[in-house]
Image (tube, rainbow, N blue to C red):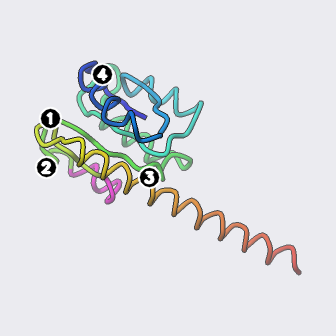
Amino acid sequence: MIVEDERFFHSLYKIMLKNTGYGIIHTYDGGEAMEKLQEKKPDLIILDMLMSVVTGDKFFLDIKNIPEYVDIPVIIITAYSEKQYTNLKEADPNLIFIEKPHLTMERLLDEVEKKIDYSRFLNKQSLRRNRCNSDTFHQG
């Protein structure tokens, strides 16, 4: 999911991700993103901070307080320093920040791949634990 209100950057991320094979959910502010989350849970969110309607930091903190969304990895791409958002790192120590002046296609694709692979690994582990717990319960 891309959550970015500036059309230029939104299009840039879309172009960068075009040949990855990942489906992209397009949203242009935090409010719209929250609505789309209810329709389909993405593997990853690329998030801008300064947006109208619902800001990126509010959206981020909101989803980290909803159990079914807390495990969605987030990459924040912002024009501002990560130091301004230490409270977000406290909510999710695995949060990735990329400052827009330092954004490259290689960096974005690398972070996306790492985050999605790790997220899928955790989901598989969770499914295995649930299956093991279920098998143990039914064997009794």
C-alpha gap between disc 2 and disc 3: 25 Å
For residue 48, above or below residue 95: above
User: In this rendering, which labeled residue sits more in front, label 1 or label 3?
Assistant: 3
What residue is drawn where x is 16% and y is 47%? 82
Mark 3 or mark 2, which is nearer the start of the sequence?
A: 2
C-alpha gap between disc 1 and disc 3: 24 Å
Mark 4 or mark 1, which is nearer the start of the sequence?
A: 4
Helix, strand or loop status at disc 1: loop
Is 123 left, or right, of 47 in this rendering? right
Q: Amino acid at mark 2?
A: Lys
Q: Which numbered tag is attached to residue 79?
A: 1
C-alpha gap between disc 3 and disc 4: 23 Å
Q: Position of residue 58 (x, y in %)?
A: 34, 35
Q: Which numbered tag is attached to residue 83?
A: 2
Q: Are marks 2 and 4 in contact (CB under 8 Å)?
A: no
Screen quadrant of the C terminus: bottom right
Q: Residue furthest front?
A: 19
Query: What stretch of residues is rendered in magenta?
Result: 86-95
Residue that numbered label 3 is attached to: 116
Helix, strand or loop status at disc 3: helix
